[in-house]
Image (cartoon, rainbow, N blue to C red):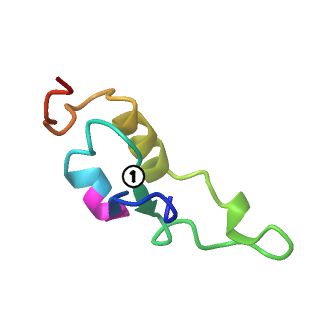
Amino acid sequence: MRAVPGTPSLTLDEALNSPLPASGCVNVDVCAVVCHGAAPTGAHSDIVHPELARVVLAAGRIGRPAAASASPV
């Protein structure tokens, strides 16, 4: 989400060990684990990792609380 102004960028370690933003988008750099694969698909097929499942669960607010956010009012 580099084209969306204000979108926070996190490393995989940050995403796994700190609260994700309570709303909006977040860019998570997962190259620490998504790094294998041959042409033509390359790492786009290297997506079966427990760390990625944990990020998806965290984004869905499953298993840990979200970061505090300002009231929309």
Is 62 above or below relative to 67? above
Q: Residue at position x 65%, y 73% from top?
A: 36
Q: Quadrant of residue 7?
A: bottom left
In the image: residue 15, left or right of residue 17: right
In the image: residue 72, left or right of residue 48: left
Q: Position of residue 20 (x, y in %)?
A: 27, 45
Label 1 belongs to which residue? 26
In the image: residue 30, left or right of residue 35: left
Q: Quadrant of residue 9?
A: bottom left
> Which quadrant, please, contains the C terminus?
top left
Q: Residue at position x 53%, y 52% from top?
A: 49
Circle 1 crowding by C-alpha within 10 Å: few under 14, some 14–19, many from 20: some
Q: Position of residue 37 (x, y in %)?
A: 73, 72
Is 64 above or below relative to 25? above
Q: Residue at position x 86%, y 72% from top?
A: 40
Q: Quadrant of residue 60?
A: top left
Q: Is residue 2 magenta?
A: no
Q: Position of residue 11 (x, y in %)?
A: 34, 66
**Relative to the observer, which residue lies in front, 56 or 70?**
70
Q: Residue at position x 47%, y 42% from top?
A: 53
Kind of residue sitting beneath label 1: Val
Q: Residue furthest bottom?
A: 39
Q: Residue furthest right?
A: 40
Q: Residue furthest top?
A: 73
**Relative to the observer, which residue lies in front, 18 or 48?**
18
Per the picture, the main secondary structure of the magenta-coloured stretch is helix
Q: Position of residue 57 (x, y in %)?
A: 40, 34
Q: Which residues are magenta?
A: 10-14
Q: How many marks do you count on the picture?
A: 1
